[in-house]
Image (tube, grey):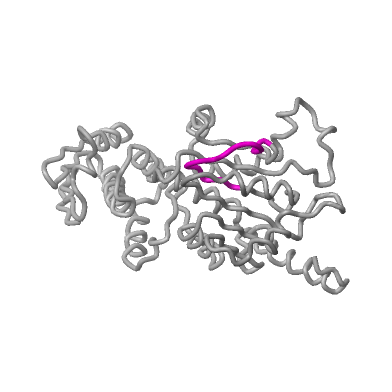
Amino acid sequence: MTKTREAGERLFMVEKVDPMTLYGVADQHLKLIEKHFSIQLIARGNQVKLRGENEELDQVESILSELIFIANRNKQLTLEDVETLVHIIKADSSVAHQTQVDKKLRDAGELDEVVLFTSNGYVKPRTSGQQQVVDAVKKGDLVIVVGPAGTGKTYMAVTLAVAALKEKQVKKIVLARPAVEAGESLGFLPGDYKEKIDPYLRPLYDSLEGMLPRDLIKKYTEQGIIEVIPLAFMRGRTLNNAFVILDEAQNATANQMKMFLTRLGVNSKAIVNGDVTQIDLPEKATSGLVEVQQILEGIEGIEFIYLSQGDVVRHRLVREIIKAYNEHHKSNGDVS
């Protein structure tokens, strides 16, 4: 993009994208940007004249450049894309410097694997294991991810689901978790059944809130576009045009796992996440995550991804803690 600068006024040249895609119907994308900035945007053909304070001109130029990048990547541009990017740029006080960094990264191909733009920036695979998950979801309809805590299993799965929803690949997201007690009893928790279940589902909400505004999550939840439910609530359903996630799958019994996997309908994708070293089921119960590795291995369309301590993206101590526990269990003859 070629830009001619004057004090308080700049000319932005629109290249590599249809100007109408960038501007939106009746210039609605530009009007949304104007709503958030004290700036005037005048579109003429493939040129946009920007008038306003220099700092905001830097920000709006950055927004227009990123919108062109998104439009080329997604083959479309929505009002939600514009709204999200506006919030990202406004939240970044150092955007004038960061823009050049992002441009260099993009020119070098570093942004090719961006999965989702959020209000906090963008989400992309941070380890080779996470990249394998992204690639597997692109190729197949069922991906089973096994790995220790801190490897981003839940966060990456929810990111991929939200991205699929935004890109209209699916019409809804269903997030499920087994309500299995880890040393504590549901009966001792205060409140009604919903209030007792909420702590089990909270990590899924936390991941969602890192990607979507709370009011949008509430709206989607009320409309049934996003469901966050205990695994048992999926019985008897067929999920078409959905992105389905089973989290903490090591605590699903063998029968529950079979029930979950057979819920998939037309044009649906599923990710199953779990850590076989943290099974909280009663001793006599078989973990569905352990069993499914033996039953479904080798079936075309089903991908197994095994993450390791090298994929841990939390505090560096988490990796050391996992390593220490693994060595302790091996020294005591515990192969689980």
- Is 234 colored magenta in this rendering? yes
Residue reaching furthest to the top: 192
Q: Residue at x 29, y 50 (%)?
A: 75
Q: Quadrant of residue 146?
A: bottom right
Q: Position of residue 327 (x, y in %)?
A: 79, 72
Residue 147 picture quarter: bottom right
Q: Residue visible at 27% across and 34% down?
A: 34
Would residue 103 be found to the left or right of residue 196 on screen?
A: left
Residue 328: give x, y in percent of width and height: 83, 69
| Residue visible at 73% across and 64% down in the picture | 322
Q: Is residue 71 left or right of residue 293?
A: left
**Location of residue 268 in the rendering, given as x and y in whole percent from the top left corner:** 50, 47
Q: Residue at x 84, y 32 (%)?
A: 187
Q: Is residue 62 visible?
A: no
Decide: is 85 above or below 218: below
For this orientation, the residue located farthest to the bottom is 331
- Which residues, given as a range, are shown in magenta? 233-245
| Viewer-proximal residue among 206 and 75 | 75
